[in-house]
Image (tube, rainbow, N blue to C red):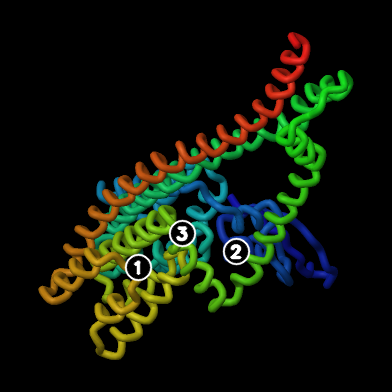
Amino acid sequence: MPTYKYSALNLAGKKVHGILNASSERQARQQIKLGNLTPLSLNLSQKNFFARASKVNQKDLLFATRQISTLLDSGIPIDETLKSIALEVEDKSLAIALHSVRDEILQGSRIAEAMASYQHIFNETYCSLIAAGDSAGNLHLAFSNLADYLEEAALVRQQVISALTYPAILLTFSVGVVFALLTFVMPQVVDQFVRAGATLPLLTRTLMVFSDYAWLALLLALIALGAGYYFYKRLSKNPKTAISFHRNFLRVPILGSFILNAEVERFARIMHLMLKSGLNLDIAMQQAQVVISNQYIAQAIHTSRADLIEGKDFMLSLRESKVFPSLFIQLLSSGYKSGNLVFMFEKVTQYMKGEIESKRATVLSLLEPMVIIFMGGIILLIVLAILIPIMQMNTIALG
């Protein structure tokens, strides 16, 4: 149960402070008044404030959403359902949010309005779908659809992460091995040749220069990466600059098409879920635009939605943006003309999931050997820089 800090005036007019536990702010004020106090200020304690602002594990949110759907489908009232789930979830922030939502419902608020107070947990898309299900009288179905959406989103996110993480780990490990060879192994071996008076070949001397400045190069590289990230985040606050950056991301060989497929799949999945829940096409596009990470694609959706509101053919804008895959445009055009967009968005979602898996396999199959060959070549140069002086010394000794 949330903890509140308060300040109030007692019957003597003296200011007092205190802490109390209450299920909601309204109940906390009632407790203060029952103690013959006049409340002046009331705030969540620091612990609960951070709980409000902290992110919630998506697995816990998925579990709660699925369980709420199951209990509602079994005929259990929403207040009892939320109370039961709040006691079961492990995430304290989510438990506090569910308790608060339940209290606001008991006070007469709609469930979507209550959830909107916790945007860090229940985002705009989540609340819109719940509001649509609540209005249509099928709240359990809305939670069920949301649970399916969260499961699919987690699966796609895992595919994206797996496609990028393994090559990154392989590259980092390879760089570490090369760095260790240059800074620890090679100087000690070459030092023996220098003491013996051997003439070092050009390759060995060149790599020794790199070895001498390896730590400086690493430091400069880290500074450059940090500075690049800082300026990227700062420049990305400008919408036009962010759109330009994200457009260039899509042009990166291999990875660009992978990112595009992931974003298009997310857009199609959101649109299918929104339209299936009974939301209007323009509202669905507005919600879908919010969840798109790539601002260049989001801008194309925004322009298409503006044309839709003006009565124009929104498919024409999507086609002219030259962002979306041609099959995506063809399927949606067919669904729009036949009045069956919900079905077509579902088909697009299934198709794009297959494309993401295919691209993931392609990315892994190409990046892995590329990293191995590149790093293997560098290690080969280091080995040769050590072996060549050894062979020269053996030749002189056998003389």
The residue labelled by disc 1 is 131
**Which numbered disc, 2 or 1, marks the residue that appears first in the sequence?**
2
Which of label 2 and label 3 is nearer to you? 3
Residue 252 numbered tag = 3
Q: CA distance from mark 2 to mark 3?
A: 51 Å
Q: Could you say which is closer to the camera, residue 194 or residue 39?
A: 194
Residue 174 seen by the camera: yes
Q: Is residue 392 above or below residue 3?
A: above
Q: CA distance from mark 3 to mark 1?
A: 39 Å
Q: Is residue 104 above or below residue 54?
A: below
Q: Could you say which is closer to the camera, residue 320 or residue 209?
A: 209
**Is label 2 in a helix, a strand or a loop?**
helix
**Is label 1 in a helix, a strand or a loop?**
helix
Dot 1 amino acid type: Ala
Query: Label 1 neighbourhood size at 10 Å, few (<14), some (14-19), many (20+)?
Result: many
The quarter in which the C terminus is drawn is top right
Dot 3 amino acid type: Val
**Extreme residue in the front direction:** 399
Which of label 3 and label 1 is nearer to you? 3
**Extreme residue in the left direction:** 338
Q: Is residue 276 left or right of residue 288?
A: left
The residue labelled by disc 2 is 25
Measured from the top left, where is residue 322 in percent x and y? 33, 73
Which of label 2 and label 1 is nearer to you? 1
| CB within 8 Å, label 2 to label 1 | no
Residue 111 seen by the camera: no
